[in-house]
Image: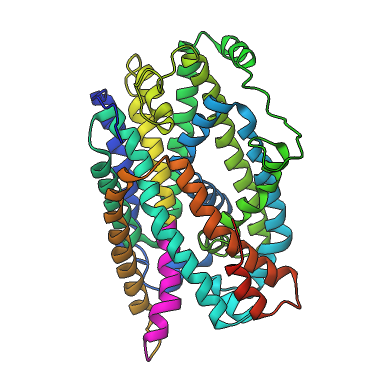
């Protein structure tokens, strides 16, 4: 894979970018070294079960809006138009299904590890099968989440993307291991603010250099980039409205029947808090998605007559958004640094949330099964921190394989389809069909075809 890189970072860019990493790390140090110091498993995994609605909502939203997704959405709008905005329909469907079907069950059972539900509903074999799928997906996705933003940093700074991804992973593993869920949630809150400021800034600057909003809108109309509503009933069509509606269950799979999302929602004290948190999650995800779509239209307006891929300024469509920012950022010092900080913030959020959730699952499904006696709360907290360190460093080493992979978008779709589809199916079977048994749940996963 070739990558056009040049150092376009100014001193202002470096200050903004490094400051975002420093503040995220300081939050981890604060919760890891002061106050309760995350000394119990309940505190480490559930934040003491007294978290607040808005921070949890934003944390769930941003942990599932990775840097990859920000880049991908802009690229897709540039190439195919604004039909990807219909993903908002999936978010709304996800909200309704979460509030009325899935979360009431999880909240009633009150499990730290959602795969415990599968053992209660079916059997231990089904639980361990689901855990294995979850573990596989997280180990694959972690380096992907880190590598995508590193492409952005490489485009701006000229630093090798694999090494910048490695550095990003080390920071994430450090503050997640010592700070637990509270660190994850409050760094997510900070990182969401960075992302929103960045998107607003990039949009404003992009519209200015593209001749104004009206010019961008007219160009998008002429280029047929605003034809979002395609009601073709063919589900194999690339941008069908019904295809995006059918994507609602996928949104449920990666948020509501995923350990990362459920663990955060269950850290709230009341179910009413869960409901409001889901609503705010949908709003937050929608807001980010809308900004990415309109920025995609701005990028199209800027490069419709000089495609960077054709001119070999970039080697993959994944690099379009970063290239646009570095291009216009030459005229506005600090913009590139803010954008890179936002992309890395999104990646850090996703990685830290997944590491914290994964540590809890491994602790319950692996460690506790092999210990003769259940560890004390203090020892359990220490074991969780060690799990984060070991798994995090293992996944960190995998980033060096990413240079040999294809476009990030297709990798993510493949991994999500192969792993999250079966998990959604087995949880839905247990929740929606009271007469379903363990044989149907276990063997149904193996006949699933993504």
Residue 83 location (% of width, % of height)? 64, 31
Q: Residue drawn 75% across and 76% down? A: 434
Up-down relation of residue 369 to residue 64 (above or below): below
Give the quarter of the image for residue 377.
bottom left
Q: Nearer the viewer, residue 120 or 179?
A: 120
Q: Evaluate whether residue 183 shows in this view.
A: no
Tell whether 233 sits left or right of 218. Answer: right
Is residue 106 found inside the magenta-colored segment of the image?
no
Q: Residue drawn 45% across and 48% down? A: 188
Residue 165 location (% of width, % of height)? 29, 45
Q: Nearer the viewer, residue 32 or 72?
A: 72
Give the quarter of the image for residue 316.
top left
Residue 328 location (% of width, % of height)? 38, 17
Give the quarter of the image for residue 403.
top left
Up-down relation of residue 249 to residue 335 (above or below): below
Span colored in magenta: 354-372
Quadrant position of the C terminus in the picture = bottom right
Q: Residue drawn 45% across and 77% down? A: 365
Display colour scheme: rainbow
């Amino acid at each position: 894979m070739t990558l056009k890189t040049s150092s376009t970072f100014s001193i202002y860019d470096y200050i903004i970018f490094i400051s975002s990493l420093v503040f995220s790390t300081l939050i981890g140090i604060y919760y890891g070294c002061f106050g309760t110091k995350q000394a119990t498993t309940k505190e480490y995994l559930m934040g003491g079960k007294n978290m607040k609605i808005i921070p949890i909502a934003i944390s769930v939203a941003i942990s599932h809006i990775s840097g990859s997704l920000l880049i991908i959405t802009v690229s897709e709008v540039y190439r195919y138009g604004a039909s990807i905005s219909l993903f908002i329909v999936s978010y709304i469907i996800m909200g309704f299904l979460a509030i009325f079907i899935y979360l009431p069950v999880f909240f009633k059972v009150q499990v730290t590890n959602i795969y415990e539900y599968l053992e209660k509903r079916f059997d231990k074999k089904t639980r361990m099968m689901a855990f294995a799928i979850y573990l596989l997906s997280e180990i694959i996705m972690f380096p992907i989440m880190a590598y995508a933003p590193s492409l952005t940093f490489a485009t701006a700074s000229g630093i090798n993307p694999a090494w910048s991804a490695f550095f990003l992973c080390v920071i994430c593993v450090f503050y997640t291991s010592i700070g637990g869920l509270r660190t994850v949630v409050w760094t997510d809150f900070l990182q969401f603010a960075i992302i929103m400021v960045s998107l607003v800034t990039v949009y404003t600057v992009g519209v200015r250099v593209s001749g104004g909003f009206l010019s961008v809108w007219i160009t998008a109309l002429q280029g047929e980039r605003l034809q979002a509503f395609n009601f073709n009933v063919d589900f194999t069509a690339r941008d069908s409205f019904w295809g995006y509606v059918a994507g609602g269950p996928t949104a449920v799979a990666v948020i509501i029947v995923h350990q990362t999302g459920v663990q955060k929602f269950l850290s709230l004290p009341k179910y009413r808090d869960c409901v409001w948190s889901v609503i705010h999650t949908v709003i937050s995800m929608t807001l980010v998605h809308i900004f990415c779509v309109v920025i995609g239209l701005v990028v199209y307006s800027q490069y419709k007559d000089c495609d960077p891929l054709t001119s070999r300024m970039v080697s993959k469509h994944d690099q379009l958004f970063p290239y646009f920012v570095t291009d216009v950022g030459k005229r506005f010092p600090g913009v590139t640094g803010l954008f890179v900080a936002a992309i890395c913030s999104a990646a850090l959020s996703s990685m830290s949330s997944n590491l914290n959730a994964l540590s809890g699952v491994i602790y319950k499904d692996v460690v506790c099964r092999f210990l003769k006696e259940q560890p004390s709360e203090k020892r359990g907290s220490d074991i969780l921190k060690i799990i984060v360190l070991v798994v995090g460093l293992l996944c960190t080493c995998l980033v060096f394989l990413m240079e040999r992979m294809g476009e990030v978008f297709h990798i993510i779709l493949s991994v999500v389809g192969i792993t999250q589809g079966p998990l959604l199916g087995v949880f839905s079977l247990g929740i929606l069909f009271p007469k379903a048994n363990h044989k149907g749940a276990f063997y149904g996963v193996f006949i699933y075809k993504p």
